[in-house]
């Protein structure tokens, strides 16, 4: 979200400075009025009454108005004032509260009662009488669920009389009826060069309309690679899948064209592209339609396109969590993780999430649970502290992943980077990360790596340096490094880096006391060039002042 924080007092200015958003200070009325159409949301450091009077004359459409969150002068409460769940104000209020150590105040009925909101279910677009069906759910009635597609839905069916219809077809508006449109359709497009965008868009609309298909269920457009950047394709505003002529020519289609084959090297573009992008066992629900400048076909996916996001949440505090990580968790249907890591992203969780908390040591089972959920077509976030690819879940999940599961890795701030920032710049030159846990790696292998790092004069960041059951390894590592490094080599000890209660100590290799170190500690041992400058560890890169 593009968020603007607006303050009018010095106390408000100080609170706003703690948020990672654009800031404006001064005449709130002028700022809000001039920026109303420029931002997605406002965080106003104002009383709710004052905020209501300022924004009321600007309100036009709940679907287009920016979200508004109010924070009191003392920073005790973050109030979702305008935009609720659909506009993102509820999530923003939780995020602001987490950043300021405040209490989020959310009055939207579905959020307040932990009820899944139909119009914000990830992966669906809701149309119809959303308000009436939501009210029925809040009143304790369960709608009849008519599921015409195999799409996972976190809403249980009941006796109605309200109805929820899961379909990619158009549904006539009626009282007490909501249509949930999943992203089940792919539109394949073939165009001539510089085809008018309005003609291509009209052909797409006509093809969908003739078949009674909902525009809201179109997830992707697909075409030949040479048309990937064609303005008429881009103008549709949807993700684009592009394939080579060789890929397209391997697909059996009902209406091949010898002329197209002669021109571009494949007998079909629109039908073949739609089927390829829709995946295995896809069904062609609209065969080729054409006008003077384009061809269009529509395919339906046989099953949901599941996705597993391996999410690094950073070291702890919200301000060190990336927007991409927050988006991946919010948009997931299932969130899997070690219990404390799930708690680390609790502000991102809503009633629609299925949450699977796992005990420590169950990494393989945790990965399998996440992969199995993704394989059924659900969007899954497997969350980790720090970075998912550094001594975390990404490697095991990728090892175990069967073919065809869509996986992305969302990077996070790992412990060595957070510790380095707390210490100064000890990782300013070449360095190595070594885990001292011999639970999964034999000690003799760790020992060889320690000798190699010592010989290479690399800065060393130790992960998993010490625990109750592993008390001697850090001392042994220190002794190995002391054979190659001076007694006075700087060592940084950071416990709970970038978390509440962070502790930072700078000592020397000779004086390193393992008793100061625990499992939430990162130890960074300098190289021969590392120095301490004004209380900060620095490993020079070699720049000349």
Image (cartoon, rainbow, N blue to C red):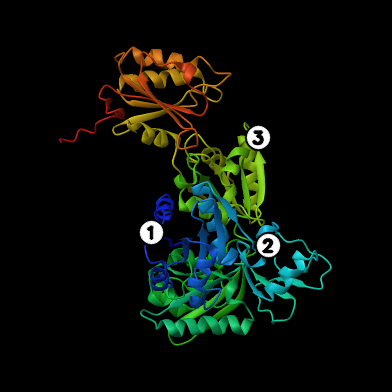
Give the Cα separation between the discs numbered 3 and 2.
30 Å
| Percent coordinates x, y for residue 347 in the rendering | 58, 50
Residue at mark 2: 110
Element carrying mark 3: loop
Which residue is disc 1 drawn over? 23
Say left or right for 220 vs 226. Answer: right
Residue closest to the eye, 540 or 76? 76
* Residue drawn 65% across the image and 54% down it: 353
Q: Residue at x 56, y 41 (%)?
A: 397
Query: Quick one: label 3 or label 2, which is nearer the N terminus?
Result: 2
Up the image or down, 3 lies above or below 17; here it is below
Q: Are marks 3 and 1 in contact (CB under 8 Å)?
A: no
Q: Is residue 339 visible?
A: yes
Q: Which mark is residue 6?
A: none
Which residue shows up at 68% across the image and 62% down it? 110
Instruction: From the viewer's side, name the closer residue of 169 and 195.
Output: 169
Q: In this figure, what is the number of numbered marks? A: 3
For the residues bearing labels 3 and 2, Cβ distance under 8 angstroms: no
Q: Quadrant of residue 186?
A: bottom right
Residue found at the very far right of the displayed protein: 159
Percent position (x, y) of residue 293? Answer: 43, 84
The mark closer to the camera, 3 or 1, is 1
Of the two numbered discs 2 and 1 on the same chain, state the one appearing first in sequence.
1
Q: Report helix, strand or loop for mark 1.
A: strand
């Amino acid at each position: 979200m593009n968020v603007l924080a607006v303050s009018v007092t010095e106390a408000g200015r100080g609170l706003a400075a703690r948020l990672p958003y654009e800031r404006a200070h001064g005449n709130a009325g002028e700022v809000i009025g001039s920026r109303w159409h420029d931002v997605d949301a406002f965080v106003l450091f104002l009383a709710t009454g004052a905020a209501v009077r300022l924004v009321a004359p600007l309100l036009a459409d709940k679907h287009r108005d920016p979200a508004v969150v109010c924070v009191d002068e003392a920073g005790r409460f973050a109030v979702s004032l305008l935009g609720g769940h659909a506009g993102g104000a509820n999530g923003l209020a939780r995020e602001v509260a987490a950043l300021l150590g405040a209490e989020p105040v959310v009055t939207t009925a579905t959020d307040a009662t932990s009820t899944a909101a139909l119009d914000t279910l990830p992966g669906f677009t809701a149309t119809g009488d959303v308000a009436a069906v939501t009210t029925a759910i809040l009143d304790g009635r369960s709608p009849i669920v008519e599921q015409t597609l195999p799409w996972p839905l976190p809403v249980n069916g009941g006796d109605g009389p309200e109805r929820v219809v899961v379909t990619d077809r158009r549904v006539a508006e009626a009282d007490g009826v909501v249509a949930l449109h999943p992203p089940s359709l792919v539109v394949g497009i073939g165009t001539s060069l510089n085809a008018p965008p309005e003609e291509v868009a009209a052909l797409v609309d006509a093809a969908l309309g003739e078949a009674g298909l909902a525009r809201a269920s179109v997830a992707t457009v697909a075409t030949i690679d040479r048309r990937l950047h064609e303005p008429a394709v881009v103008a549709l505003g949807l993700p684009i899948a592009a394939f080579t002529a060789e890929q397209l020519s391997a697909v059996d289609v009902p209406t091949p064209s010898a002329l197209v084959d002669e021109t571009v090297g494949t007998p079909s573009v629109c039908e073949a592209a739609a089927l390829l992008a829709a995946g295995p066992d896809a069904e062609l629900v609209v065969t080729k339609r054409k006008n003077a400048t384009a061809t269009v076909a529509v395919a339906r996916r046989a099953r949901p396109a599941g996705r597993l996001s391996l999410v690094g949440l950073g070291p702890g505090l919200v301000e060190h969590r990336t927007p991409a990580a927050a988006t991946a968790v919010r948009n997931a249907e299932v969130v899997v993780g070690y219990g404390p890591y799930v708690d680390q992203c609790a502000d991102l969780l809503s009633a629609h999430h299925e949450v699977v908390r796992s005990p420590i040591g169950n990494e393989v089972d945790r990965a399998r649970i996440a992969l199995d959920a993704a394989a059924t077509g659900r969007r899954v976030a497997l969350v980790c502290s720090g970075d998912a690819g550094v001594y975390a879940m990404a490697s095991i999940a990728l090892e175990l992943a069967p073919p065809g599961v869509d996986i992305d890795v969302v990077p996070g701030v790992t412990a060595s980077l957070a510790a380095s920032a707390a210490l100064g710049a000890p990782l300013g030159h070449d360095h190595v990360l070594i885990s001292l846990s011999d639970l999964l790696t034999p000690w003799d292998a760790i020992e060889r790596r320690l000798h190699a790092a010592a010989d290479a004069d690399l800065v060393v960041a130790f992960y998993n340096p010490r625990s109750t059951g592993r008390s001697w390894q850090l001392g042994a590592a220190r002794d190995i490094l002391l054979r190659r490094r001076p007694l006075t080599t700087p060592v940084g000890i950071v416990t709970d880096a970038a978390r509440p209660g962070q502790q930072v100590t700078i000592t020397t290799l000779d004086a390193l006391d393992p008793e100061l170190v625990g499992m939430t500690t990162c130890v960074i041992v300098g190289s021969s060039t590392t120095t301490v400058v004004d209380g900060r560890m620095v490993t020079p890169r070699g720049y000349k002042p």
